[in-house]
């Protein structure tokens, strides 16, 4: 790649979900393959890469700020390359070049493998270069990667989403659900284990649907995949994200109960507690089904932690609908909730629904929701005080260097005084708890 020889460094900034963070490990791998090395500020980068998200409008506005900086830096040194990857690139495609002409390359999430070629094309032709495939032809999970250090790793098991929840842009930008062959996943997990990884998080927009799309060549489904991975020696913990409530099967419950490495945590997005809103969101479950599922999960998996996602202010949401969300949350008693104000997304069905709500209403509802979610999380965490939990040490605590930080199998953050190396499993007596973390002492 002679034309890129003058480029030595890259700056990579990632927005959005874990899937995107993982894609960034692959982008970093491709750039490393081109002989570039990472720097931690855009001023020092010859190539600036923004791996973007388009899930909510806030994500777009944040990016605009970063691109303003990229434009200034490019004006200082015209040789610089500006690359926009990910979901926003995919949703805007060529139109993005009109709005931001200083951007050199656009690359959608299913086209990441083309990045080196696109850079070459840009340098050779002097014209904008972009690629926006809708379906996977090359799994980004099979590209070289530069992994964040530590005992945990992400493993992509599927891509895309075919659910088309009416508010959501993901199926539009990531394409239809497609599952990665189980043999490739198992090989990657074995390689990670050999490299010292002790915990893997299996990634997909709806992991419970793994292997179910028409045309999937393998015979495996998600519980069977878990079974295969549970046998990989060295892997102590297996996590997965995200699970759709409509696809949590009795076999999955059994697999979670029977397979020792599979952790006692399920992220189970609820979105709303109102049947009318759930139907308008096209979530394909109702309040009663969700509650029934939670009851079955808790009786088969004692100690299970449940976290969730909630959207407030979906079009036409009334105070009564919102009250249903609060009451369902209270009834379940989630361990944690990610809360979002509904954001209309171009091309989605909900964006053109009547009854879009004013900001004052949604913000006020969000504040009430957050207060409740914090109270419930505190209650759940307080219950652990006096118990002994196993943590996997991740590294030093952020605010106190005399402590290490780790996570329980239920995905709760615990701070512990002492000097334990990353990757060690430590038994900890929990002493205190807040809504976001626990503090404890190591016990033999
Ligand atoms: N596949 C996952 C979630 C993907 S996006 C699932 O189905 O749960 C993560 C979360 O973002 C969603 O669960 C939802 O709560 C939120 N979200 C998605 N689209 C949104 C929108 N248009 N406005 C606000 N929040 C949104
Ligand atoms: Fe979006 Fe729904 Fe798919 Fe999740 S399941 S990614 S919310 S469309
Ligand atoms: Fe993830 Fe955002 Fe795309 S949440 S899938 S990076 S739109």
Image: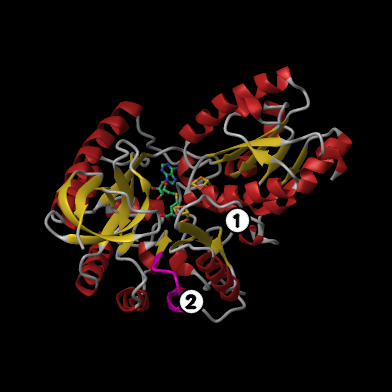
Is 328 in front, or is 356?
328
Which mark is drawn over residue 221?
Answer: 2
Q: Is residue 19 left or right of residue 258?
A: right
Q: Does residue 43 show up magenta in the picture?
A: no
- Vertical placement of residue 356 versus 282, above or below: above
Q: Could you say which quadrant of the image residue 48 lies in?
A: top right
Quadrant, the C terminus:
bottom left
| Residue at x 63% of width, y 25% of height | 43
Q: Earlier in the sequence, mark 1 or mark 2?
A: 1
Q: Is residue 358 left or right of residue 58?
A: left
Pinpoint residue 37: horizontal percent, then vertical percent: 67, 40
Mark 1, residues whose alpha carbon is within 10 Å: few (<14), some, or many (≥20)? some
Q: What kind of element bears circle 2?
A: loop
Is 56 in front, or is 336?
336
- Vertical placement of residue 357 versus 244, above or below: above
Q: Is residue 172 left or right of residue 133?
A: left
What segment carries the magenta color? 225-238
Pinpoint residue 240: horizontal percent, then vertical percent: 42, 62
| Residue at x 70% of width, y 45% of height | 31
Q: Could you say which quadrant of the image residue 320 lies in?
A: top left
| Residue at x 74% of width, y 21% of height | 77
Marks 1 and 2 sit apart, C-alpha to C-alpha, by 20 Å
Q: Which residue is mark 1?
A: 175
> Under 8 Å from ligand 3: the CB of mark 1?
no
């Amino acid at each position: 790649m002679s034309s890129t020889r003058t480029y030595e460094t890259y700056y990579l900034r990632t927005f959005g979900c874990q899937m995107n963070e993982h894609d960034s490990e692959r982008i970093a791998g491709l750039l490393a393959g081109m002989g570039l090395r990472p720097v931690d500020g855009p001023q020092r980068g010859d190539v600036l890469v923004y791996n973007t998200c388009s899930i909510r409008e806030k994500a777009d506005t944040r990016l605009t700020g970063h691109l303003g900086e990229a434009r200034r830096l490019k004006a200082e040194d015209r040789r610089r390359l500006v690359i926009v990857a990910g979901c926003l690139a995919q949703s805007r495609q060529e139109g993005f070049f009109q709005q931001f002409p200083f951007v050199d390359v656009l690359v959608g999430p299913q086209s990441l493998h083309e990045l080196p070629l696109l850079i070459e094309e840009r340098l050779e032709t002097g014209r904008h270069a972009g690629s926006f495939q809708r379906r996977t032809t090359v799994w980004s999970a099979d590209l070289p990667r530069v992994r964040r250090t530590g005992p945990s790793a992400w493993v992509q098991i599927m891509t895309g989403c075919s659910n088309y929840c009416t508010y959501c842009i993901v199926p539009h930008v990531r394409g239809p659900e497609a599952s990665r062959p189980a043999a490739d996943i198992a090989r990657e997990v074995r390689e990670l284990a050999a490299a010292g990884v002790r915990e893997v998080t299996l990634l997909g927009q709806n992991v419970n649907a793994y292997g179910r799309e028409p045309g999937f060549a393998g015979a495996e489904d998600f519980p069977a995949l878990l079974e295969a991975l549970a046998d990989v020696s060295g892997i102590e913990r297996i996590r997965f994200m995200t699970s759709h409530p409509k696809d949590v099967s009795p076999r999955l419950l059994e697999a979670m109960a029977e397979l020792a490495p599979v952790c006692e945590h399920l992220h189970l997005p609820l979105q709303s507690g109102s049947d009318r809103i759930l139907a308008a969101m096209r979530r394909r479950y109702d309040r009663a089904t969700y509650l029934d599922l939670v009851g079955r999960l808790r009786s088969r998996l004692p100690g299970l932690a449940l976290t969730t996602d909630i959207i407030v202010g979906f079009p036409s949401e009334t105070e009564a609908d919102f009250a249903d969300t609060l009451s369902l949350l209270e009834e379940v008693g989630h361990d944690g909730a990610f809360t979002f104000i509904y954001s209309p997304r171009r091309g989605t069905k909900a964006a053109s629904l009547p009854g879009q709500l004013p900001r004052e209403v949604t913000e006020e509802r969000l504040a009430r929701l957050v207060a409740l979610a914090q109270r419930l999380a505190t209650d759940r965490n307080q219950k652990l005080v006096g118990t002994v939990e196993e943590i996997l040490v991740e590294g030093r605590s952020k605010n106190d260097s005399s402590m290490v930080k780790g996570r329980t199998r239920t995905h709760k953050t615990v701070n512990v005084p002492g000097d334990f190396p990353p990757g060690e499993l430590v038994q900890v007596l929990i002493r205190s708890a807040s809504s976001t973390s626990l503090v404890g002492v190591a016990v033999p």
